[in-house]
């Protein structure tokens, strides 16, 4: 990763973890805990990349009622328990508020399971996915050396995203109704993009470029970024308030 105005943050995180071995919970060896953590973060990165590029169609990979997002989060919960500092989350005010919101959501959902069934659970998952934030936060607090690694992977993903999304966007807009769906969800196309999602990712890319964390700051990459903003902006303004 090239030196940037914010590179000292990553360096300080790395230095703070130097000499501090990763000690997993229970009898799990530190090396095994670190390996499992790195593998799960890689899987989580694939999940986020797939959701960004494939949209709702990617989210339906799996076997109902467990799809790729739910399976990844369940695995992440197990990985979180391997971290030596996962209990520190219980003292973080933001984490406490998130856990309180999750509890409130569960309390307001359970009485309606008999009436609405799976629909009630799916509505609750809008809040339930906040668990992903807790898991990732707990992992990075325990192993801050993984943060520069994640940033490097994201920079590679950004270039792939900018290259493939114009074609996928045109295909989805022009042939969305005829794109085949999954056998267990025929109403959901394999490529199923939500117009309001892509501007959110584009806003994140622009923010990284402003901070100097995106290496593709040449005129060509910026032109491609603005082209995608214009394409999505002509269809929706949904990404404005989300980002």
Image (cartoon, rainbow, N blue to C red):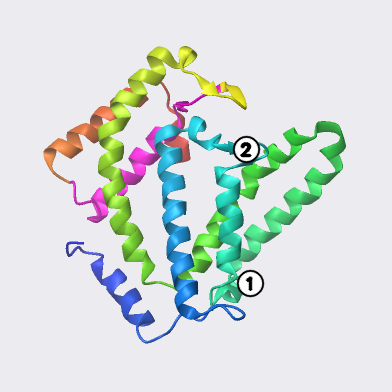
- Which of the 4 image quarters holds residue 131? bottom right
Is residue 9 on the magenta stretch? Answer: no
- Which of the 4 image quarters holds residue 160? top left
Of residue 197 and residue 158, the one placed in the foreground of this image is 158
Q: Which residue is mark 2?
A: 63
Badge 1: residue crowd in 10 Å (few <14, some 14–19, many ≥20): few
**Position of 118 relative to 137 (above/below):** above
Helix, strand or loop at mark 2:
strand
| Residue 116 place in picture, x, y as percent | 81, 32
Quarter of the image with the N terminus in it = bottom left
Looking at the image, which residue is at 43% across and 33% down? 54
33 with respect to 211 (left or right): right
Helix, strand or loop at mark 1:
helix
Is residue 210 on the magenta stretch? Answer: yes
Residue 171 seen in the current view? yes
**Position of 210 relative to 242 (above/below):** below
Q: Nearer the viewer, mark 1 or mark 2?
A: 2
| Residue 24 place in picture, x, y as percent | 54, 78
| Residue 4 place in picture, x, y as percent | 19, 63
226 with respect to 66 (left or right): left
Badge 2: residue crowd in 10 Å (few <14, some 14–19, many ≥20): few
In the displayed image of the protein, which residue is found farthest to the bottom?
19
Q: Which circle's residue, 1 or 2, is located before the other in the chain?
A: 2
Q: Which residue is mark 1?
A: 90
Quarter of the image with the C terminus in it = top left
Looking at the image, which residue is at 41% across and 56% down? 42
Which segment did they paint magenta? 188-216
For marks 1 and 2, give the CA distance. 33 Å
| Residue 182 place in picture, x, y as percent | 55, 26
Looking at the image, which residue is at 25% across and 71% down? 8
């Amino acid at each position: 990763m090239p030196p940037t105005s914010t590179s000292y943050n990553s360096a300080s995180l790395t230095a703070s973890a130097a000499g501090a071995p990763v000690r997993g919970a229970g009898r799990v060896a530190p090396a095994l805990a670190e390996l499992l953590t790195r593998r799960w973060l890689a899987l989580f990165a694939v999940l986020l990349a797939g959701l960004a590029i494939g949209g709702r169609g990617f989210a339906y990979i799996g076997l109902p009622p467990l799809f790729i997002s739910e399976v990844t989060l369940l695995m992440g919960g197990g990985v979180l328990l391997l971290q030596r500092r996962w209990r520190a989350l219980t003292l973080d005010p933001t984490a406490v508020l998130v856990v309180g919101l999750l509890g409130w959501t569960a309390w307001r959902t359970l009485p309606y399971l008999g009436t609405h069934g799976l629909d009630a659970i799916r509505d609750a998952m809008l809040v339930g996915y906040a668990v992903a934030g807790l898991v990732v936060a707990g992992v990075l607090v325990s192993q801050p050396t993984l943060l520069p690694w994640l940033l490097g992977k994201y920079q590679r993903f950004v270039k792939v995203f900018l290259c493939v999304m114009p074609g996928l966007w045109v295909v989805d807009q022009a042939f969305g109704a005829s794109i085949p769906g999954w056998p267990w969800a025929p109403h959901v196309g394999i490529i199923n993009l939500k117009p309001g999602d892509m501007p959110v990712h584009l806003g994140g890319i622009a923010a990284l470029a402003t901070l100097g964390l995106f290496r593709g700051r040449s005129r060509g990459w910026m032109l491609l970024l603005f082209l995608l903003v214009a394409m999505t902006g002509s269809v929706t303004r949904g990404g404005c308030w989300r980002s």
